[in-house]
Amino acid sequence: MDQLWLGYDGLSLSYDQIAAVLIYQPALHGRIVQSYGRVPANILAIVVTDRGEYLPSSWSVQHLRQRLARWRSAARN
């Protein structure tokens, strides 16, 4: 199973667990804390999982969406 590292130690997930990639907004701090336990520095994007978790990423939204699109394309072939 392919894993996507979100830019923080120990924080990665399977591509098939990704439901959405969102632009980081401080209003999401509560959801990040519920899912990850804290709000780390340098957040650029939020990855929403198929279980409803909001995980922070230090990668840009564009980078994450490109990686996800490549994985989905390869998975179809």
Image (tube, rainbow, N blue to C red):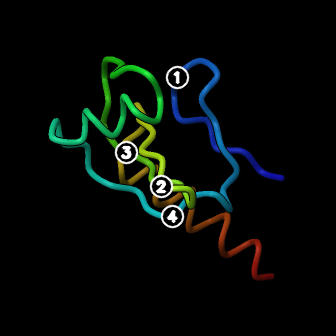
Which label is found at residue 8? 1
Task: Determine the secondary structure under disc 4.
Answer: strand
Mark 3 to mark 1 CA distance (whole Å): 12 Å
Marks 2 and 1 sit apart, C-alpha to C-alpha, by 19 Å
Vertical relation: 23 (above or below) 66: above
User: Could you give the CA–CA distance between mark 4 and mark 1, rounded to whole angstroms?
Assistant: 19 Å
> Helix or strand or loop: what does disc 1 sit on?
strand
**Disc marking residue 25:** none
Give how far apart the Cα atoms at labels 2 and 4 are.
8 Å
Instruction: Name the mark nearer the viewer: 3 or 2.
Output: 2
Residue 22 in picture, x, y percent from top left: 32, 55
Residue sitting at x 63%, y 36%: 12
In the rendered image, the vertical position of residue 72 relative to residue 2, given as above or below: below
Q: Are marks 2 and 4 in contact (CB under 8 Å)?
A: yes
Q: Is residue 58 above or below residue 49?
A: above
Corner quadrant of residue 38? top left
Residue linked to disc 3: 46
- Left or right of 74 in this view: 62: left
Give the mark count. 4
Cβ atoms under marks 3 and 2 closer than 8 Å: no
**Real-space CA distance between mark 3 and mark 2, rounded to the nearest whole angstrom:** 12 Å
Look at discs 2 and 4 and give the one toward the viewer: 2
Mark 2 or mark 4, which has the lower sequence index?
A: 4
Q: Amino acid at mark 1?
A: Tyr
Q: Give the mark, 3 or 2, whose residue is nearer the N terminus.
A: 3
Q: Secondary structure at mark 2?
A: loop
Left or right: 2 in relation to 45: right
Q: Which residue is mark 2?
A: 52
What is the spatial separation of the Cα atoms under label 4 and label 3, in whole angstroms? 11 Å
Q: Tell me the kind of residue under disc 2.
A: Gly
